[in-house]
């Protein structure tokens, strides 16, 4: 039951109808008997500064999750950045401190790694192809390199963004072979769509799936629909597939810890 004492959490993005975080949070709150609720809030692509001011003014809003396309601008609007948020300049989780300041961090990448390992896929010494160099792609690249990936190939529609990400990850993790790629995904153990393509059934693929090795695992970050055009096509080709929801499940406990919800998450 929502009352005057209920604490608020949110997820912001554009679009917002596809997100599953509110369900996961609210199930957790119910199971743990926590007087809180998580709501989806639709803030337009060009309206984040005004929306941010509104979020800051809601005094019973204790934190919020950030999804596309707001992850990079949110980092600039935070009062402080923590851990991977400071490392990458991208955030997906923001908490309100007791003094009212907003601190952001990035948990997508670590959640993706956790999702892979919990389903039996190794990261160490594997070769990864990432399509996308925005918020999700940046998170995945740093987390995979930090977890011992042998090589990363990064492809992005805007080439300069991929170039900057290659340089940044290469400097931070010189032991990982990080290079700029094209739509050709050959020669990798895991190929990942880290773009928003796949939210709509008629979306084009973010890379040339036909080029991927037959043995490659094909992974998504898009969570809804669960079977995106990429995963449908990959399954038809005989690839093992990995759902975007695994990334969310892998980072839920990390989100709860960062937001100060210390009750262990049960899954």
Image: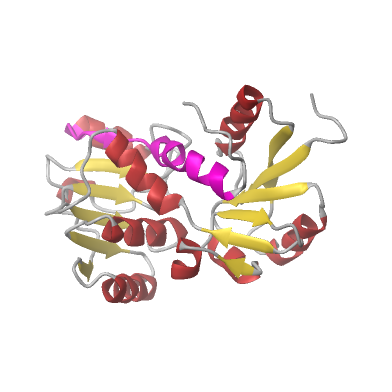
- Please give the name of the residue rendered at 46% of the width and 60% of the height, measured from the top-left corner: 135
The location of residue 200, given as percent across then percent down, is 47, 41
Residue 255 within the segment the image draws in magenta: yes
Is the image coloured rainbow, by chain, by secondary structure, or in one colour? secondary structure
Residue appearing at x 43%, y 55% in the figure? 136
Residue at 24% across, 49% down: 191
Q: Nearer the viewer, residue 23 or 237?
A: 23
Counting from the top left corner in percent of width and height, residue 22 is at: 62, 35
Relative side of 265 to 98, left or right: left
Q: Quadrant of residue 46 in the image?
A: bottom right
| Residue 169 location (% of width, % of height) | 31, 70
Instruction: Report which quarter residue 78 is drawn in.
Output: bottom right
183 on left or right of 187: right
Left or right: 81 as drawn, with respect to 35: left
Q: Position of residue 184 (x, y in %)?
A: 19, 58
Viewed as shown, does residue 174 lie left or right of 15?
Answer: left
Majority secondary structure of magenta residues: helix
Q: Is residue 233 visible?
A: no
Magenta stretch containing residue 113, yes or no?
Answer: no
Note whether 254 is above or below 134 in the view shown.
Answer: above
* Placement of the N terminus among the 4 image quadrants: top right
Give whichever of 148, 260 is nearer the camera.
260
Q: Which residues are magenta?
A: 237-258
């Amino acid at each position: 039951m929502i009352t005057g004492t209920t604490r608020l959490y949110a997820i912001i993005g554009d679009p917002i109808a596809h997100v599953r975080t509110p369900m996961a949070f609210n199930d957790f709150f119910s199971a743990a008997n926590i007087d809180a609720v998580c709501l989806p809030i639709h803030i337009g692509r060009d309206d984040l500064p005004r929306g941010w001011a509104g979020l800051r003014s809601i005094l019973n809003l204790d934190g919020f999750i950030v999804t596309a396309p707001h992850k990079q601008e949110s980092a600039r609007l935070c009062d402080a950045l923590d851990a991977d948020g400071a490392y990458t300049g991208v955030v997906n989780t923001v908490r309100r401190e007791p003094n009212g300041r907003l601190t952001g961090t990035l948990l997508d990448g670590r959640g993706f790694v956790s999702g892979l390992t919990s389903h039996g896929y190794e990261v160490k010494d594997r070769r990864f192809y990432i399509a996308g160099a925005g918020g999700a792609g940046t998170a995945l690249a740093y987390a995979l390199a930090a977890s011992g990936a042998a090589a990363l190939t990064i492809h992005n529609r805007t080439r300069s963004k991929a170039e900057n990400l290659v340089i940044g990850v290469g400097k931070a993790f010189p032991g990982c072979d990080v290079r700029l790629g094209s739509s050709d995904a050959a020669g990798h153990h895991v190929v990942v769509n880290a773009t928003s393509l796949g939210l709509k059934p008629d979306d084009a693929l973010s890379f040339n799936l036909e080029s991927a090795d037959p043995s490659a695992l094909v992974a998504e970050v898009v969570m809804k629909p669960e079977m995106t055009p990429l995963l449908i096509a990959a399954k038809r080709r005989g690839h093992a597939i990995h759902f975007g929801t695994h990334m969310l499940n892998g980072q839920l406990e990390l989100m709860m810890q960062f937001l100060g919800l210390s009750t262990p998450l049960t899954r």
